[in-house]
C-alpha cells in the first residue's frame, strides 16, 4: 500500500473511531464518504489550482489535457569550464552566471539544462530575465522577483524547470510550438507589479511561469495564475 | 543596442504567455505594423490573433513581411500616426475587434553581459 493510501486509510479510520457511537450510522458513513472523496481528490485539486490544501496527500502530476511533461533535460557541458563560480550536475560542470557574463560566449546553459540565448528586445534572454528583478510600473503586468540578484533568479528558474520536467506542482500548456509551465514553488518568490499590480497592491506571487521553446528559455517571471 | 522605453500602444494581452501586452510594432525594414508580444516575442501579422503566431526563431525576431529584425532599431513601437495609417489596425478599431491601450515597453537596463574592462585600460563591449 502506498504512503498516501496508508495516510488516507488512517484518516478514515480515525473518523470512524471518533464518530462510532456518537453519530447515527448513515450520517457517519456519509461523512466518511465525503472525507474519502476529498482526500482522494486533494492531490488533483492542489495541482490544478496550485495551492496547498489541508490533508494527507502530497501534490503530484498536473498537466493539462493528459499531456505528458517534457522529459528531463540531460545537462550538457555547452560552456567551457569557468574559473569562477559554477556547479556540477549530472557529472558536467556548469559555469555560474557571473563567469558567463565575463566571457565571450553567447549561449548560457543553466545547471538544470535551460539555454539562455541571444534574443528579445534586451539582446539576450539573461538580460530579459534581469528585467524582472525590478518593477516596471509602466507595463500593464510585470512579474518581479524578490531577489535582486540575477544568479539567484536563474537558480529559481532552474528549480521551477526541474519541477516542471518532473511534473510536480505544475500546470503545462503547449500553445503553438511553445511550452508554458506554471509552477507552484510553495513560497513567496516575488510579486505582480506593473500597472495591474500597483492597482491590486503589489500582490505576492508563489508561482513562476516559464515560457520555453524546447530547452530554450523565452521568458520567466513570478505570476499569480 | 535596445531602444529606449517609449510609449507602446497595445491591443490586448497575449494568449500564448498570458501576461505580455500585444504591442503594435513598426518594422524598421518595410514599415509594416505587426503585433508583437512584449513578453514572449510572439508575432502576428494582423488582427487574427486566434491564428498561430510566427514561429519562434532561435535568436532573431524577423519581420514576417521582410525579415528585418523586429527587436532592434530602427524597428520601434508604432507611433499613433503609423497606427492610424495602418489599414488593418484602423479596420479593427472601427469594427471594435480590439481596443487600443497605452503603456510602456520594457525599460532598458545596464547591460549585464558587457565584458569587464581589462585592468590595463578600457575595453569590452556589448555581447551581441
Image: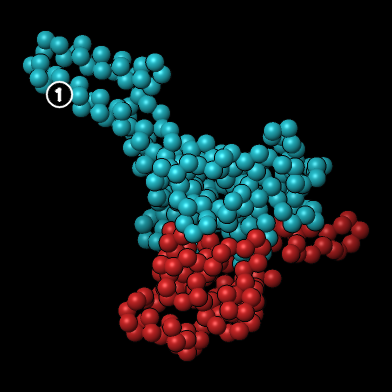
Residue to which mark 1 is pinned = A30
Identify which residue is drawn at 16% across, 14% down: A19
Q: Where, quadrant-wise, is the N terminus of chain A in this rendering?
A: top left
Q: In this view, does B8 lie above or below A90?
A: below
Where residue A221 sits in the image (x, y, percent)?
Answer: 52, 52
Residue A191 left/right relative to A130:
left
Where residue A123 sits in the image (x, y, percent)?
Answer: 67, 64
Q: Is residue B47 above or below residue A71?
A: below
Where residue B54 sits in the image (x, y, percent)?
Answer: 54, 68
Residue B78 left/right relative to A45:
right
Identify which residue is drawn at 87% across, 57% down: B118
Q: Residues within 10 Å of mark 1 (few under 14, many from 20)?
A: few
Q: Can residue B21 be seen in this view?
A: no
Identify which residue is drawn at 77% across, 54% down: A105
Q: Can residue B42 be seen in this view?
A: yes
Q: Which of B10 and A195 is in front in this view?
A: B10
Where residue B97 sits in the image (x, y, percent)?
Answer: 34, 76
Q: The cyan chain is which one?
A: A
Q: Quadrant of residue B99?
A: bottom left
Q: In this view, does B121 lie above or below A98?
A: below
Q: The red chain is which one?
A: B
Q: In this view, does A219 lie above or below A152?
A: below
The single residue placed furthest to the left in the displayed view is: A24
Amino acid at each position: 500500500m502506498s504512503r498516501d493510501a496508508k495516510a488516507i486509510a488512517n484518516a478514515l479510520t480515525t473518523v470512524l473511531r471518533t464518530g462510532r457511537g456518537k453519530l447515527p450510522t448513515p450520517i457517519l458513513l456519509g461523512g466518511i464518504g465525503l472525507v474519502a472523496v476529498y482526500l482522494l481528490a486533494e492531490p488533483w485539486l492542489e495541482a490544478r489550482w496550485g495551492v496547498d490544501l489541508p490533508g494527507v496527500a502530497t501534490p503530484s502530476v498536473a498537466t493539462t489535457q493528459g499531456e505528458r511533461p517534457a522529459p528531463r533535460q540531460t545537462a550538457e557541458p555547452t560552456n567551457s569550464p569557468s574559473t569562477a563560480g559554477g556547479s556540477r550536475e549530472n557529472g558536467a560542470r556548469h559555469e555560474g552566471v557571473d563567469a558567463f557574463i565575463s566571457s565571450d560566449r553567447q549561449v548560457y546553459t543553466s545547471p538544470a539544462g535551460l539555454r539562455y540565448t541571444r534574443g528579445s528586445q534586451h539582446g539576450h534572454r539573461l538580460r530579459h530575465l534581469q528585467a524582472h528583478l525590478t518593477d516596471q510600473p509602466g507595463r500593464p503586468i510585470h512579474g518581479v522577483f524578490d531577489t535582486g540578484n540575477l544568479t539567484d533568479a536563474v537558480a529559481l528558474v532552474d528549480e521551477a524547470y526541474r519541477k516542471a520536467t518532473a511534473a510536480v506542482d505544475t500546470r503545462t500548456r503547449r500553445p503553438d510550438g511553445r511550452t508554458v509551465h506554471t509552477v507552484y514553488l510553495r513560497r513567496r518568490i516575488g510579486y505582480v507589479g506593473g500597472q495591474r499590480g500597483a492597482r491590486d497592491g503589489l500582490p505576492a506571487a508563489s508561482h513562476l511561469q516559464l515560457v520555453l521553446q524546447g530547452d530554450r528559455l523565452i521568458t520567466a517571471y513570478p505570476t499569480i495564475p | 543596442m535596445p531602444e529606449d522605453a517609449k510609449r507602446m500602444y497595445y491591443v490586448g494581452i497575449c494568449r500564448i504567455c498570458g501576461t505580455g501586452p500585444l504591442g503594435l510594432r513598426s518594422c524598421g525594414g518595410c514599415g509594416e505594423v505587426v503585433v508583437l508580444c512584449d513578453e514572449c516575442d510572439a508575432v502576428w501579422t494582423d488582427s487574427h490573433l486566434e491564428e498561430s503566431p510566427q514561429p519562434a526563431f532561435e535568436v532573431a525576431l524577423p519581420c514576417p513581411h521582410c525579415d528585418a529584425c523586429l527587436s532592434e532599431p530602427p524597428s520601434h513601437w508604432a507611433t499613433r500616426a503609423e497606427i492610424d495609417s495602418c489599414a488593418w489596425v484602423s479596420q479593427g478599431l472601427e469594427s471594435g475587434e480590439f481596443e487600443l491601450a497605452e503603456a510602456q515597453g520594457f525599460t532598458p537596463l545596464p547591460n549585464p553581459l558587457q565584458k569587464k574592462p581589462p585592468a590595463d585600460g578600457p575595453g569590452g563591449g556589448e555581447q551581441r
